[in-house]
Image (cartoon, rainbow, N blue to C red):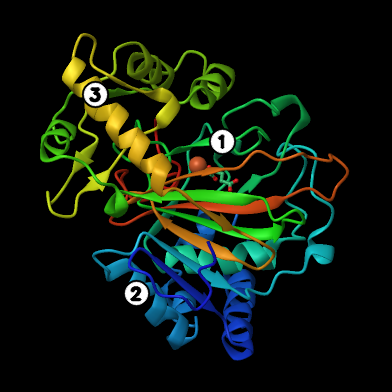
Amino acid sequence: MDVDSERVPSFLGHTLSAEEADGLCTAARKALAAQGSPARPAFYEGLKEHIDRIPESVRSILNEFKNSPSLCALRLSGVRVDPDACGPTPLSWQEPLDSGRQALEEAQLALLAAALGEVFAWPTIQRGRMVQNLLPVESDREEQSGHGSVALEWHTEDGFHPDRCRYLALLGIRNPDRVPTTLGTVAEVRLTDHHRSVLHQRRFLIRPDLEHLRQLARIAPDSDMLRRARAMHEAPEPAALLFGAPESPCLRIDAPYTTAVAGDDEAAEALAAIVGELTRVQRDVVVGQGDALLVDNYRAVHGRRAFLPRFDGTDRWLKRVSVAAGPLPTAPGAGARVLAI
Ligand SMILES: O=C(O)CCC(=O)C(=O)O
Ligand SMILES: [Fe+2]
């Protein structure tokens, strides 16, 4: 798909004018000077005056997306990204990425994301860094994660968790082979009334993806969080896959980790139907250098095509931020933006 300047019901694309791009970049520069690194939670406290510096025309597109009853993704192209200044693509996310070389790019993404809601992170993903790095890691080639290079099956981000993000924001630093992100939206699936009604009932299990469990076992082996995450894995609470208004429902599903409750054949059939439909309507969106892709994680699932990584510093590299639509579930104060699993 090419969403540039094209208006279809579910997707909106806009290429920033030079003036808009400069305006966003200037706002980000000022935010950086005042708020410190966008990798840290403190950046996002008292950010409103900086969000208000995003050019009015861009803020109005962000608001259109946020308030729309049907849009599931917005791509803003032409964000000022300087891949040379950012440096070579790191070979792993553990590499020290806090040199500030990508701070301006991260701050632009952070401002766009913060215009949609509250930015947060998980302690189990890249040690709670607020802006994560998506890049292929050699030892993770086969993983179903942002570090793999096999096809990443479509999923709701953190679909297993009640506090999953409402929006996912990506920014392309480089993507030389134009490897697409995939998107599918609930608005486009065709289902029978019977399947729809089954999907609205708590007859499905969505288990946490293993990255959370792996990281928790490493960073907090004796924690309540690990016990909770294991319980979510071993005995997940049945959940509905469709929720909200029946005529325009929202969706939560994670293809590799979702099953029907044991013995519920009707639920298994409805699950197969929606999986098939989401695959049918799935489309490719390239997040290239300077493209920001904002995904409504309640309306769309996403994934990534397989690709051949090079591991030579020139690989695909995206930045990612998670956003809650409303107030965060944690009490305000230090640490509130790193949610408990
Ligand atoms: O690499 C991509 O395009 C998407 C990766 C992904 O699923 C994510 O960032 O949550
Ligand atoms: Fe994802």
Q: Nearer the viewer, residue 260 or 52?
A: 260
Disc 1 within 8 angstroms of ligand 1 (CB): yes
Label ID, residue 269: 3
Residue 247 in sight in this render: yes
Q: Position of residue 39 (x, y in %)?
A: 60, 53
Label 1, label 2: how far apart the Cα atoms are: 30 Å
What residue did someone put label 2 on? 63
> In the rendered view, does 111 fall on the left or right side of 174?
left
The answer to whether mark 3 and mark 2 are in CB contact below 8 A is: no
Q: Residues within 10 Å of mark 1 (few under 14, many from 20)?
A: many
Q: Nearer the viewer, mark 1 or mark 3?
A: 3
Residue 18 appears left or right of 61: right
Q: Which residue is the extreme one toward the right?
A: 312
CA gap between label 3 and label 2 equals 38 Å
Q: Is residue 141 above or below residue 177?
A: above
N-terminal of the two: label 3 or label 2? 2
**Decide: marks 1, 2 in contact (CB < 8 A)?**
no
For the point 37% across and 22% down, the residue is 207
| Residue drawn at x 32%, y 43% as measured from the top left | 330
Using the rendered image of the protein, determine whether residue 156 is visible from the camera's viewpoint.
Answer: no
Q: Is residue 195 left or right of residue 273?
A: left
Determine the secondary structure under disc 2: helix
Say whether residue 209 is left or right of residue 243. Answer: right
Image: 45 above or below 253: below
Q: Callout 2, which amino acid?
A: Asn
Residue at disc 3, secondary structure: helix
The amino acid beneath tag 3 is: Glu
Check contact, mark 1 vs mark 3: CB within 8 A: no
Pinpoint residue 234: horizontal percent, then vertical percent. 35, 11
- The mark lying in front, picked from 1 and 2, is 1
Q: Which mark is residue 152?
A: 1
